[in-house]
Image (spheres, grey):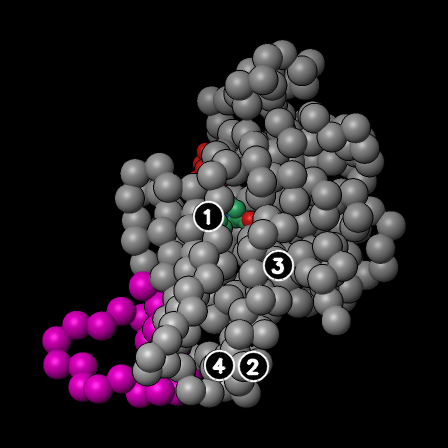
Amino acid sequence: MKVGIFGANGRMGRALIEAAHNNEDADIAHALVRESSSFKGIDAGQVAGIGNIDSALTTIKAIDELADVYIDFTLPEACMNNLAWCVENKKPVVIGTTGLSKEQLAKIDEAACQIPVVFAANMSVGVNLLVNLLKTTAKVMGQHSDIEIWEAHHRFKKDAPSGTALMLGKAIADELDRDLDKVSVYGREGDTGERDRETIGFATIRAGDIVGEHTALFADIGERIEITHKASSRLTFAKGAVRAAIWLKDKSTRLYDMQDVLGLKD
Ligand SMILES: NC(=O)C1=CN([C@@H]2O[C@H](COP(=O)(O)OP(=O)(O)OC[C@H]3O[C@@H](n4cnc5c(N)ncnc54)[C@H](OP(=O)(O)O)[C@@H]3O)[C@@H](O)[C@H]2O)C=CC1
Ligand SMILES: O=C(O)C1=N[C@H](C(=O)O)C[C@H](O)C1
């Protein structure tokens, strides 16, 4: 499977180069940077810190033969442009970009009527297993507990709460027949009053080089459960994304998520 990587000079872009290069079922067709990028022409392996791999960072305008599947871990504006390009060229795409608005999420839904798309705020096996554990916990304890989700990421992260935290919150809210838009509380300050049992609270930490940590708390009177996932390397997300790209190559047009890729759906 020939893969094209958007945003190849980014933190995730570099991890994707390494993950794709080390996966025997994937070949890097092109690692893409923006037209004005000073990284243009540099070997992708050098940028990823894995030594020369004979594939210079290039731009969308400079490529002739297209890849089988594309992967996008960029920022919302670039992600939308890349998605439109994939639709125009009828190419499947794996999207890991977070911080998308409701309108941008709707564009992904629209695109998935024309090309196969995997979209997931977290491509790690552990977090996708966590979703299932949280659904079970919500079923058993959710109606009686106070539910809070907190997440910690590196100082460079631009969106909050993380896409993963929102995804976990949505999974819990769906299980409890609650509308996340109505029950979410993003941070508290001042005279907040007593906690409303129906709410799902979110708290965000941004510090140093934390790769990504998420905890969901279900607290009743007398006991509580805390379930935590900690990522210690971006390679875990990148390997998941490459796995998703290989899986997506021959799939039919539709929107998939990482639970589909990993076969974790009931
Ligand atoms: N789903 C998952 O499992 C994971 C998702 N993420 C998400 O992936 C995204 C990227 O994260 P990260 O790699 O840390 O971010 P970086 O800031 O390191 O990388 C962003 C990349 O996007 C490119 N880019 C940004 N804006 C534009 C634009 N307007 N046009 C063209 N290229 C652009 C940047 O290029 P340039 O340098 O030229 O600006 C860079 O290559 C985030 O949304 C993050 O939350 C991260 C980890 C895991
Ligand atoms: O920006 C990051 O780094 C990460 N972003 C994703 C998110 O917003 O959930 C996934 C991961 O935790 C790392």
Mark 3 packing: few (<14 Cα in 10 Å), some, or many (20+)? some
In terms of secondary structure, where does tag 4 sit?
A: helix
Badge 3 or badge 4: first in the primary sequence: 3
Q: Which residue is mark 3?
A: 129
Look at the numbered disc 1 and give the secondary structure of its residue. strand
Mark 1 sits on what residue? Answer: 230
Q: Position of residue 15 (x, y in %)?
A: 56, 32
**Image: 152 above or below 45:** below
The reply to whether discs 3 and 4 touch (Cβ–Cβ < 8 Å) is no
Q: Please tell me whether mark 3 sits on a helix, a strand or a loop.
A: helix
Which callout, 1 or 2, points at the residue further toward the start of the chain?
A: 2
Residue type at mark 3 is Leu
Relative to 154, does residue 133 appear above or below in the rendering? below
Residue type, numbered disc 1? Lys
Residue 141: which numbered mark, if any?
Answer: 4
What span is colored magenta in the figure? Answer: 182-203
